[in-house]
Structures are given as structure tokens and as C-alpha cells.
Amino acid sequence: MNIVIIDTGCANLFSLKYAIQRLGYNPVITKNIKMIEFADKLLLPGVGTPISAMEQLHKFDLVTVIKNFKKPILGICLGMQLFCLYSQECNRVKMLGIINSVVVKLTVNKLSIPHMGWNTVISYDQEFLFRGIKPKSKFYFVHSYMLEMNKYTIAYSDYGGYFSAVIRKKNFFGVQFHPEKSGFVGAQLLKNFLEIGEYDYSSNRFN
């Protein structure tokens, strides 16, 4: 299986690669368009600001490639947020527009920002990413901006209010937390993603 991690220049690329290698796979980190186009599974990680990530994607002509990708793709942290229309961070920078929603700053009252550490995730959908993971398991988060609850939310968390912890639109999956830093449950989630079949657009389901 060809597993590709898109090289967005962020800091967590190799920790994600090692997490997948521990599952017995051999992922490649690359910006190469052909390698990305022919991937069986694609991962879009992100740490930092949306403007710097989008600059990287535009620089290497990857925006259209990602938007047109037909096999399972997983956005992680900022990578998930990049699926949205725009972010309030960086003066409403325009993003990929796959999800018809926007990224907003966390509203946490007296809680500290960024939201950093372990938090409970409540899943609506045990069919794909959460197979073999106990309900109300905790994952590791580091973020100051969030995707609000929307029709693509399949799991949520609470930090001064509910926000989308996991989204899914057809073959596009996104997680706000870092599975590569989330111990056993994170490893299981990555394993579940890598075992998802190809999406069949005619039947609106995975094979």
C-alpha cells in the first residue's frame, strides 16, 4: 500500500511517519505531485499557521491535487482545519474549501489557550476511525482554533464548549487531535484509517 504524508514543512512529520511505521507500514513524506496522486492513503498533517501551510500547498501546486483526491485522506490538527473555507486566524486566510465551514478561535472563558493536553472524545460513528477504541477515550490536543460542530462532525470534544474533534465528508477525514501523540488509542485510530477501503462514489460508501 502506498501511504503518503504530504510534506507541509511542519514539525510533526517524522513523529507521524514513525507512528505509522510502528504499525508495520512504510509511509513516504513528499511534495511530489505524482506520488501524491497515486497514493492509496494520504495524510495531511499541520502545525503552525494556516497561511504558512497554504503557501506551501500553493507553492508546490498541491491544492487541486488534494481537492480532487478520491481515496481516503486524513487531515491532522491544522491539516483538518485546512479542509474548511477559511480561518479567522491570519486575517481569514482562504483554505481548501472541501468542508463548507469556517475555523474560529476557541472560546474558553477562564480556560487557557492553547488547548493543550489530553481530552475526552465522544464519537457518533464507530464504523471507521473508532473501531476497537473504547467510548470516551482521551486523545492529545494542541490548538487555539477550532471547527465548530457541523453536519460533517462525527466526534466532538469539550473545552469551554463543544467543538468538532473528528469530521468526515466522503473520503475526507479530519482529526483535531494528534493521533501520533495519543498512545494506544491514537495508534488504533491510524490503523483503522489505513485499513479503510476505497470510497465508491456511485454507492456513497467505502468498499
Image: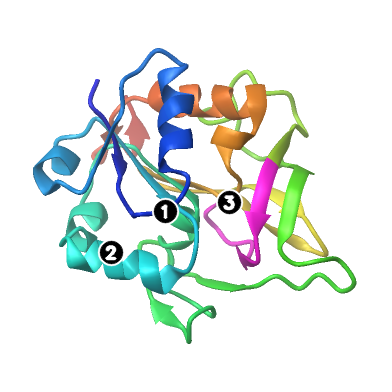
Can residue 85 be spotted in the picture?
no
Crowd around label 2: few <14 · some 14–19 · many ≥20 (10 Å): some
Q: Is residue 158 above or below residue 201?
A: below
User: Which residue is rendered at x = 68% and y = 42% of the image?
Assistant: 140
Secondary structure of the residue carrying tag 2 is: helix
Q: Which residue is mark 2?
A: 56
Amino acid type at mark 2: Gln
Q: CA distance from mark 3 to mark 2?
A: 20 Å
Query: In the rendering, at what x and y percent does residue 4 appear?
Result: 27, 35
Q: Is residue 188 above or below residue 55?
A: above
Residue found at the very far right of the displayed protein: 110
Q: Is residue 149 a member of the stretch shown in magenta?
A: yes
**Magenta stretch: residue 188 in it?**
no
Name the quadrant containing residue 148: bottom right
Mark found first going from the N terminus, 2 or 1 = 1
Q: Residues within 10 Å of mark 1 (few under 14, many from 20)?
A: some
Which numbered disc covers residue 176?
A: 3
